Image: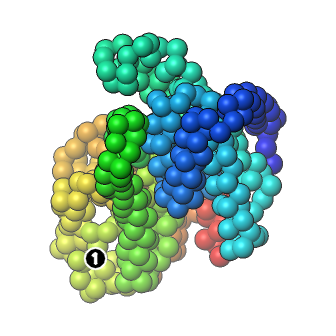
Amino acid sequence: MAPSPREWLWYAMVFGVGGSLWGVALGQLLHQTWSSQSLWALGVLAVVTFLTLFRYVRLSQDDYHSVYTLDDVPLYALIFLQGWSAAAVVAGVARLLFEMVRVGRAMREHPERVHWAHVIYHFSDIPMSINVTAAAGLTYTALCGDEPLMGGFHNGLAVAAATAVWFLLAFGQNSLAITLRRQLPLSWMVQVFRQNFRHIRLHVLMLVPLGALLAIFLQSSPWAALLLLVPVSLMHNALEAQHKLRLESVSTIQAVARYLEERDQYTQGHSARVADYAAAMAECMEMSAEDVEQVRRAGLIHDIGKVDIPDAILRKPGRLTESERQIMRTHTDRAVDLGRKLVSLSRELPFRDAAYHHENFDGSGHYRMVGEEIPLVSRILAVADTFDAMTSDRPYRKGMPLENAVVRLKEVAGSQLDPVCLEAFEKALEKGAIQQILSAVANP
C-alpha cells in the first residue's frame, strides 16, 4: 500500500523536524569533543543500542504496529544528567541501528514481505524518537532550576512536565503515524492512542522513576546502578509475557473453533462465517479496529459451549426433538461460566461477549435480558448467527436465498434481534461485504 498524500506530508514534516533537531544536538555535542558529556553519551549509546536491538516487544501483530523498548530508561537518565542534546543524539543513532538491523533481518528471513512503504514507515521512528527526546529534554532544562535531581518540589515539577511531554508526544506521533499508514480517518487517531496505551499503561509510567534512579545512582555510586537491572528486566519480562499470552489466546481461539468444526461437519465454517459477518457489521457501526477484532474473536468462539454437547445431538442429521433442543441450548450456559472464570483473559477470549447471542431483544430469551442489557457484541452475533443459520445448507433443508433471509431478519427486528444491529447488517449488505463472504463460501 503506497503512502497517501497525507502520509507523505507527515513524513516530510517529521523527518524535517527530527533531522534539524538531531543536527543541532550533534553540533552541540561535537563542540565539546571528548568532554565528560561526550563520554556519558557514548556510554549510554552502548546501553541503549543493546536494549533496542535485543529487548523489545511488539504491541500488536498488525503490519503497522507499535514497538515497546527499554531504551527510554537510560535516555531519561541522560536527559537528567547531560541535557537534551546528548540524549537526542543517542536516541537518533540507536534507533537508526535498530531499524537497520530489523530491515536486514527481514530481508534475510522473508524478503517477499519487505516493501518500500513499510521501510519508510518504520524508519520514521528515527526522527520521532529524536523529537520526543529533544522535546522532553528541553522541557526539563527549562524548568529544572538549580535544585539537584528530585531534590525539591521545583525539580520534581520539571521531571513531571518532561514526562508529560514525552508521553503525549511519543504516543501522539505514533498514533498519527499508524492512522495515516492504515489510511484511516484522522478521527481514529484517538482510538489508536487508547489501544496502544491499554497494552502498556503502568509499564510506561515506571520508566520515569527508573530513569531518575539511574541518573541518581550514576552520579553518586555508578556500580549501584546495576541493581536497577532487576526491576527493569522484570518490567520487560512482564510485558513480554503479556504479549505472548495474547498471541497464545488467539491461537487457542482458532484451535477451539477448528475443533468444533471437525466435530460438527454440518456446520463446517459456521463460526468463521459468523465472525466475518459480525466484523463487517462492527465496521459499519464505526467501531475501532481493536473492537472490530474483539467482535471477530467473539464470533469464532460463540459456540464454544458445544464442546460438551453429546455427538448424538450435535451431529444428528435430522431435526432435533424438543428435549434435544433444551440440551443444545445449554451451550450458552457453559460460555457464560467460562466468562466468569476467565476474567483476566476477557480481552483475548471474550466469552461473555459471545455467550448471550441467543438472547432475544424483547427479553423472551433464556436469561430474560432485555434490549441493551444484552452485551452489544452478543446482539451483533445474534444477527450474524441467525443469518448464517438461514443461508447455510443442512441435511434436512437447503439454505435460504439471500433476499429471503433478509426479509426474515426484518420480520424479527425488535423482538428477536436488535434493530440497530440489523441496520448495521443492511449497511454491510449495501457495501457488498456480506455478499463477498457468501461468495467465498460458494467458491472456496
Q: Position of residue 1 (x, y in %)?
A: 77, 52
Q: Residue at x 73, y 53 (%)?
A: 118
Q: Position of residue 402 (x, y in %)?
A: 59, 59
Q: Nearer the viewer, residue 182 or 39?
A: 39
How many numbered discs?
1
Q: Position of residue 324 (x, y in %)?
A: 22, 75
- Can you say whether 392 is above or below 415 in the image? below
Q: How is the image coloured?
A: rainbow
Q: Residue at x 21, y 65 (%)?
A: 334
Q: Residue at x 45, y 36 (%)?
A: 77
Q: Nearer the viewer, residue 354 or 195?
A: 195
SS class of the residue under badge 1? helix
> Viewed as shown, does residue 259 lie left or right of 373?
right
Mark 1 lies on residue: 307
At label 1, counting other C-alpha atoms closer than 10 Å, the crowd grade (few under 14, some 14-19, many 20 or more) is: some
- Image quadrant in which you'd find residue 86: top right
- Image quadrant in which you'd find residue 200: top left
> Viewed as shown, does residue 40 lie left or right of 324?
right
Residue 354 appears in view: no
- Can you say whether 393 is above or below 161 in the image? below
Task: Report the amino acid beneath label 1.
Answer: Val
- Image quadrant in which you'd find residue 351: bottom left
Residue 163 appears in view: yes
Q: Residue at x 65, y 76 (%)?
A: 444
Q: Nearer the viewer, residue 193 or 417?
A: 193
